[in-house]
Each structure stands twice: as structure tokens, then as C-alpha cells.
Image (tube, grey):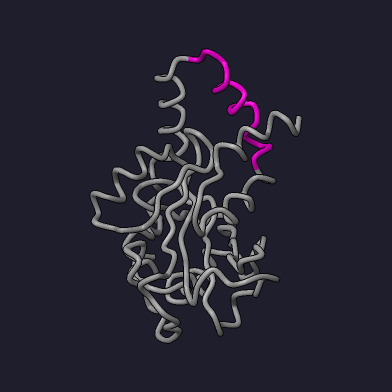
Amino acid sequence: MRERCSACASAGRFAGPLIAMTQMLEHQCRPYEPLVNAAMHPVPLATLTAFAAAVGELPSLCGATPLESQLDCKSSAHRFIAPLVADKSLDAHPMRVEVNSVNAFKPAKGSDLTAYGFRVYAVLGYEQGVDMFKRGSGQPINDSAYGVVVLGASEAVEAKVRDSGSTAEVKQVVPMMMTAVFCDGSGVRSTAGPVTTSASRNR
């Protein structure tokens, strides 16, 4: 079973600050294993595309919280994540902390987080000097970095990200199913302060 799950890992390895984040998600790919196995067999591409679209772009509920406004990479991890924790859209404690200090937060039960119309699977971030983020054992990824993992095919996600004008990195995590949108913090320094965001106001 572990060999089969390696399809998730091999598909999700890429250079840059997203490597550790991808490794963080590898251990969680088992729930998707039957679908990944199906993708390795001669299943029509249209069928897989339709499935990915259905998973990633299910009709949003009236209380959906869109996050894309801050995925323009002009915000910070604290400003992005703190309001979501405060209004209980995210669990307060990260479900995993990577060596490079990337914290992965799980959407709270009953929350409906979206980004570019896709369902959010995890919210990622780290900001130096902010207590809500736990430090990993290695060199932090940056002073501040943040992003999301959404349920959707990378091509569809990237098209929407670029249409919005965002410079965020878009990387495939699981083929046809999971995509990361990540701001590595190269243009933003630690800016903990007011945390009111458009995402919070939209709730």
C-alpha cells in the first residue's frame, strides 16, 4: 500500500520552499489512494478532469469564506491566518510543523474556506516572532510565508491565480486533485499587527 501511495510523493516533489510542505502532505494521501490508483490506469482524461472539478469546485455555501484576496503575496502569515483562527474557521493549533517551520492548520469542522472557488484542504504559514506559529527544528522558510492547499487540478488553479494577478507559486501536490498556492514571503517582512482582513469581514 505504501508503494502505491508513493505516487502522491513523487508527483508532489518540486524545488523551492514548497518541498517541505509537499512532504508534510505525503502522509495524508492514503484517503485518496484509490483515486490515484485509478489515475495510473487507462481511465479517460475527461473522467479524471471531471472528478477533480467536482471535488474542487463544489457549490459554495452561503457562509463561505474566500481567501484569495490575500493570496496576492502582499500580506503576511499573521495577518492572513490570525483572523481565521479568531473566528474559528481554523483549528488554533497546527496539525503539523515542518522542519522549516511551515505550520499546517486544518480547517475547523463546519467551516467553508475557499480560494479561487476551490475548497481549502489546509492553510499554511509561519511568521517569525509570532506566538501562534510553532518553530521547526531547522532554518525557518522566511520571516513570513503563507499559503493554502486546495482541492483542484493545478492547471485550473493556476489559471485562476494568474487571472487574479497574484504572483504566488502554484505547484501540484497530488495529480488532478491537490494544488498548493504559496507566498514564500520574499516581498514581505514580519508585519504582525492589525489582523482584520477581507476574509474575516466576509464572514
Instruction: Looking at the picture, tell me which residue is in the foreground, 61 or 11.
Output: 11
Q: Is residue 88 magenta?
A: no
Q: In the displayed structure, would residue 60 be above or below residue 86? A: above
Q: The magenta stretch spans which residues?
A: 29-43
Q: Residue at x 55, y 64 (%)?
A: 90
Furthest residue toward front: 15
Q: In the displayed structure, would residue 73 be above or below residue 46? A: below
The quadrant the N terminus occupies is top right
Instruction: Looking at the picture, tell me which residue is in the foreground, 177 or 185.
Output: 185
Q: Where's residue 133, x and y in %?
A: 60, 75
72 relative position to 55: left or right: left
The quadrant the C terminus occupies is bottom left
Q: Where's residue 139, x and y in %?
A: 61, 72
Q: Where's residue 21, x and y in %?
A: 57, 55
40 relative position to 75: left or right: right
Q: Residue at x 67, y 61 (%)?
A: 96
Q: Main secondary structure of the magenta part?
A: helix
Q: In the displayed structure, would residue 201 be above or below residue 113? A: below
Q: Is residue 39 magenta?
A: yes
